[in-house]
């Protein structure tokens, strides 16, 4: 029996437009979804580019104005894969038109925008999700499982780094394709919104809310040519950010992010140390979760001293999160699969009138609050509490 369609319209054709389109195509092949995703229309202002993108990825049609896309009555879901400064307007218009909304991270440019977006999706009662895709790395999902199984015990320390090196050259312009991430008017912030938002989402998923932060940011290259005007303009984003955090559960944390760590490409790591065990993850080694077991919660007994040591768990068994949908044990999956896993979860969550899948807009707003607090702390050189 054929499944009811889930008709999708996407805004954006860049890195994330491709990652999401791939997920929409792959998810029904690997997961038993209650709806059949239909790639109805892709949208962007540049007609030549969006036409080519739509043809390449098998979108049935294209639009050059997102308002027209939202008005179409043959579309159920709007996916926002466009730069941060348009998330707010598109999400609110889509919700008001009764469409489901998926939104790339970070949720918004700031908390005020995020709150309006949450209000709009909740008032309309439309299913929603933000693409914090790293939650769906099987090794990170396994870390969450270990926390939920009480294998870490009372948490003491959380340590996150997110390091890249692609903006070190002074002649990298700001603005335009991909490089809009360097333009504060479009991105809202630098590494805080782009990279630390991922780290914060993961941290709060694993270890609960962050209540206080104290941050230092730095902008190493003060002026860059703007790709659209050709003029040298001040750089207003944070190139690097480090902050201390206090979690509601009493654990303390450190977070570090930069795009100036020569040799680090997408070095997204975290370690959580508790009384009974620790976990460590590194996205540059994505199928491995490291686990140190001190005390087993099932037996209640301490692991015998001569057997303690860090385990490198190769997260590819059928028993591991998501892996029963992919290949056979030992065969790894990659970056793109995290988007496919996330979209599959979202569609499965629509069964029985589901209104969204974690992280919803409301959950992503909590991450936005931490990001705003971090930037405020750095500006004012003080600790900032998060309500
Ligand atoms: C930045 O370089 C970036 O592309 C982020 O925007 C993505 O969210 C991250 O997954 C990879 O790095």
Image (cartoon, rainbow, N blue to C red):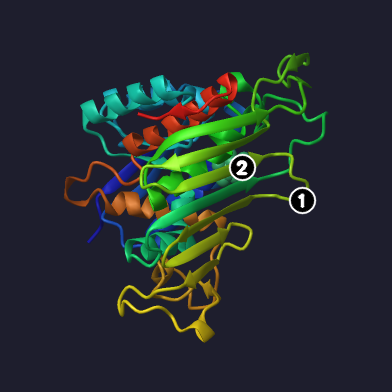
Residue 240 pos. (x, y %): 66, 34
Q: Is residue 101 left or right of residue 338?
A: left
Residue 88 pos. (x, y %): 42, 23
Marks counted in the figure total 2
Judge whether 257 appears above or below 70 on screen.
below
Residue 38 visible within the image: yes
Assign the C terminus to one quadrant of the image.
top left
Query: Which quarter of the frame holds ligand 1?
Result: top right
Q: Is residue 321 left or right of residue 181?
A: left
Q: Nearer the viewer, mark 1 or mark 2?
A: 2
Residue tagged 2:
256
Q: Residue at x 67, y 24 (%)?
A: 175
Q: Residue at x 64, y 29 (%)?
A: 217
Q: Residues within 10 Å of mark 1 (few under 14, many from 20)?
A: few
Residue tagged 1:
263
Q: Residue at x 66, y 20 (%)?
A: 236
Q: Is mark 1 within 8 Å of ligand 1?
A: no
Residue 12 visible within the image: no
The mark that comes first in sequence, 1 or 2, is 2
Q: Is residue 109 left or right of residue 152?
A: right
Assign the N terminus to one quadrant of the image.
bottom left
Q: Secondary structure at mark 2?
A: strand
Q: Is residue 134 left or right of residue 168?
A: left
| The image quarter in which residue 185 lies | top right
């Amino acid at each position: 029996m054929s499944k009811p369609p889930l008709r999708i319209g996407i805004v954006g054709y860049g890195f994330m437009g491709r990652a999401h389109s791939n997920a929409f195509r792959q998810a029904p092949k690997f997961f038993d979804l209650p709806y059949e995703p239909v790639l109805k229309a892709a949208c962007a202002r540049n007609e030549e580019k969006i036409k080519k993108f739509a043809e390449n990825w098998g979108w049935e049609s294209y639009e050059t104005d997102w308002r027209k896309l939202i008005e179409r009555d043959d579309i159920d879901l709007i996916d926002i894969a466009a730069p941060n400064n348009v998330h707010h307007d598109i999400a609110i218009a889509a919700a008001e038109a009764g469409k489901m909304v998926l939104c790339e991270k970070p949720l918004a440019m700031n908390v005020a925008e995020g709150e309006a977006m949450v209000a709009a999706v909740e008032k309309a009662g439309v299913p929603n999700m933000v693409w914090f895709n790293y939650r769906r790395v099987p090794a990170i999902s396994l870390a969450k499982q270990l926390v939920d199984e009480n294998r870490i015990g009372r948490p003491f320390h959380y340590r996150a780094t997110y390091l890249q090196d692609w903006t070190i050259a002074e002649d990298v312009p700001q603005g335009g394709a991909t490089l809009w991430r360097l333009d504060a008017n479009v991105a809202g912030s630098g590494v805080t919104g782009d990279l630390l938002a991922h780290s914060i989402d993961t941290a709060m998923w694993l270890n609960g809310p962050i209540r206080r932060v104290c941050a230092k940011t730095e902008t190493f290259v003060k002026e860059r040519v703007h790709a659209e005007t050709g003029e040298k303009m001040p750089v207003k984003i944070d190139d690097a950010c480090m902050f201390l955090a206090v979690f509601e559960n009493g654990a303390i944390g450190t977070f570090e992010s930069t795009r100036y760590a020569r040799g680090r490409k997408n070095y997204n790591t975290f370690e959580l140390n508790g009384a009974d065990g620790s976990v460590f993850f590194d996205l540059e080694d994505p199928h491995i979760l490291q686990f140190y077991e001190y005390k087993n919660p099932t037996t209640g007994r301490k692991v015998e001293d001569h057997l303690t040591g860090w385990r490198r768990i190769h997260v590819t068994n059928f028993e591991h999160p998501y892996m029963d949908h992919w290949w056979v044990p030992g065969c790894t999956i990659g970056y793109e699969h995290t988007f496919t896993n996330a979209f599959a979860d979202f569609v499965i969550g629509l069964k029985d009138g589901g209104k969204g899948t974690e992280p919803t807009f409301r959950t992503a707003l909590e991450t936005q609050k931490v990001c705003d607090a971090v930037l405020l702390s750095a500006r004012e050189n003080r600790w900032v509490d998060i309500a």
